[in-house]
C-alpha cells in the first residue's frame, strides 16, 4: 500500500510521475534504451532539458521576459555561494533576511565574498515568525530572503520592495502559490522539496543582472557560462531533470500554479483548523506567518505520544516527525500530497481527542 507521505524532503511526487519515471529507466520513449544510458547531447535528452526549462518559465509566467531557467547541481546549498559570486560586486555588500537555518547558511557563504548586512532576524524566538518592518539599505547589491522556512513552518506572505535586486530561495514552496514572479531578479530551488528528486536545482535568473560584478567567476559557478551552454556546460543530472520535467508537466496539465494553489490552501486550512481547535495540539509558527507547505505542531501532553505515534503509523502515515530543532511534528503538504492524506491525519488527531 502506498503510504501517506508527509516527508519534508526528498518528498512525495505525483504517482503518475513515478510511473512514467520508472518506465523511462527501462525503455525511454520506446527507443530501446534507458534514459540514463543515453548521451545528454542526444536529441531525446536535449528535448527533455528544453522542455524542463521552458515549462519552468511558463508556469512562473516568465516566458519571453528576459529570464533564463537553469537546472544545475550542488543543491540549493551551492546557490548560497553562486548568488554572491554572480551578484555581489568586488568589495560590495548584500542584505539578508534571517528566517532560519537555510537563511543562516546562505548568510555564511555570502560573508566569504563580501559584506553582509542582516536586516532582521527571528532567531530570538526560534524562528517562529517572519520579521517585518525592516529597512533594506539602498547601497546593497541585492537583498536575499527565504520564501518558505521548511524547518520552522513559516512563510513570507508579502515580499519587501527594494530598489536593488530581489533574490529568493524558494526551495520549499516554488510552484505552490501565485506570486508576481517578475518582481524577483533571481529565484532558486533545490528540486527535492516541490519539483522532483534530489540532484538538480532550478535557477531562474534575469539575464540583464549578470556580468556586472568585476569578479573572475569560476566556470561552474558562473550563471552566464551555464546560460550560454543551454544548461549543459557539463553533464547535467539527466534523471533528476527528467523527473522534474514530468512533475512540471503534471502541474501544467492540472491547471498550473493557480489550480494547485487552491488545493494547497484547502489542505493547509484543514490541518491548521484541526490544530487550532483540538486542545491536544499547538501550532508552533505565528499564525499570520504560517506555511502552507510545512505545518509544524506540538502534542501538548507527552504522555499521549506513544499512542498518537502508533495511531498514525497504523494509518499508513510516514514522515511527520518534527525537525530536531523544533521538536514535535511537521507535516509537509507539498503539491503532490493529496487532500485525502491530510484528512487521514486530521481524523487521527480527532480520534486521539476522544
Ligand atoms: C532543503 C532546503 C535547502 C537545502 O537544499 P539542498 O538542495 O539540500 O542544498 C535550502 N533552502 C531551503 C529553503 C530548503 O528547504
Image (spheres, grey):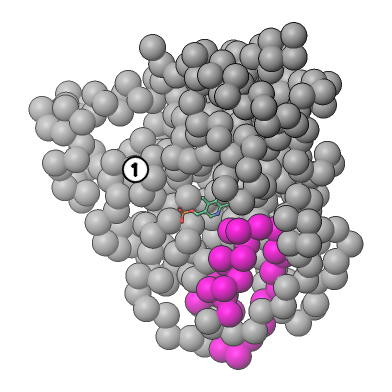
Query: Which quarter of the picture shows residue 90?
Result: bottom right
Comparing 123 with 69, the one in front is: 123
Q: Residue at x 61, y 31 (%)?
A: 331
Left-right relation of 52 to 272:
left
What is the x, y in percent for residue 312? Answer: 55, 19
What is the x, y in percent for residue 72? Answer: 39, 56
Q: Residue furthest right?
A: 133
Q: Is residue 217 inside the magenta stretch?
A: no
User: Which quadrant of the figure contains the C terminus?
Assistant: top right
User: Looking at the image, is 131 positioned above or below residue 337?
Assistant: below
Comparing 240 with 269, the one in front is: 269
Q: Is residue 164 visible?
A: yes
Comparing 173 with 141, the one in front is: 173
The segment highlighted magenta reads 83-111
Left-right relation of 294 to 156:
left
What is the x, y in percent for residue 63? Answer: 56, 46
- Name the residue that disc number 1 marks: 240
Q: Residue at x 45, y 64 (%)?
A: 78
Q: Secondary structure at mark 1?
A: helix
Q: Residue at x 30, y 50 (%)?
A: 237
Left-right relation of 110 to 263:
left
User: Looking at the image, is 39 positioned above or below residue 99?
Assistant: above
Amino acid at each position: 500500500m502506498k503510504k501517506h507521505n508527509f516527508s519534508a524532503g526528498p518528498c512525495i511526487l505525483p504517482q503518475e510521475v513515478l510511473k512514467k519515471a520508472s518506465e523511462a529507466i527501462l525503455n525511454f520513449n520506446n527507443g530501446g534504451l534507458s534514459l540514463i544510458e543515453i548521451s545528454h547531447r542526444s536529441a531525446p535528452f536535449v528535448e527533455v532539458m528544453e522542455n524542463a526549462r521552458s515549462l519552468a518559465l511558463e508556469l512562473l509566467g516568465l516566458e519571453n521576459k528576459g529570464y533564463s531557467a537553469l537546472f544545475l547541481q550542488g543543491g540549493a546549498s551551492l546557490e548560497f555561494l553562486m548568488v554572491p559570486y554572480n551578484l555581489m560586486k568586488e568589495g560590495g555588500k548584500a542584505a539578508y533576511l534571517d528566517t532560519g537555518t537555510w537563511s543562516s547558511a546562505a548568510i555564511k557563504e555570502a560573508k566569504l565574498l563580501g559584506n553582509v548586512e542582516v536586516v532582521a532576524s527571528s532567531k530570538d524566538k526560534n524562528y517562529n515568525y517572519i520579521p517585518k518592518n525592516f529597512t533594506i539599505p539602498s547601497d546593497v547589491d541585492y537583498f536575499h530572503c527565504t520564501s518558505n522556512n521548511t524547518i520552522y513552518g513559516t512563510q513570507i506572505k508579502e515580499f519587501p520592495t527594494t530598489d536593488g535586486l530581489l533574490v529568493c530561495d524558494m526551495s520549499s514552496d516554488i510552484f505552490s502559490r501565485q506570486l508576481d514572479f517578475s518582481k524577483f531578479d533571481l529565484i532558486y530551488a533545490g528540486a527535492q522539496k516541490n519539483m522532483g528528486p534530489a540532484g538538480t536545482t532550478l535557477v531562474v535568473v534575469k539575464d540583464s543582472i549578470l556580468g556586472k560584478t568585476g569578479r573572475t567567476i569560476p566556470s561552474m559557478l558562473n550563471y552566464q557560462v551555464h546560460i550560454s551552454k543551454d544548461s549543459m556546460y557539463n553533464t547535467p543530472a539527466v534523471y533528476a531533470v527528467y523527473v522534474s520535467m514530468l512533475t512540471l508537466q503534471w502541474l501544467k496539465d492540472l491547471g498550473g500554479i493557480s489550480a494547485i494553489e487552491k488545493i494547497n490552501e484547502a489542505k493547509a486550512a484543514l490541518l491548521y483548523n484541526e490544530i487550532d481547535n483540538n486542545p491536544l495540539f499547538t501550532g508552533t509558527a505565528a499564525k499570520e506567518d504560517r506555511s502552507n507547505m510545512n505545518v509544524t505542531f506540538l502534542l501538548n501532553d507527552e504522555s499521549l505520544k506513544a499512542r498518537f505515534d502508533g495511531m498514525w503509523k497504523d494509518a499508513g502515515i510516514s514522515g511527520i516527525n518534527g525537525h530536531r530543532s523544533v521538536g514535535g511534528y511537521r507535516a509537509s503538504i507539498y503539491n503532490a500530497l493529496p487532500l485525502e492524506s491530510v484528512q487521514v491525519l486530521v481524523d487521527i488527531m480527532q480520534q486521539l481527542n476522544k
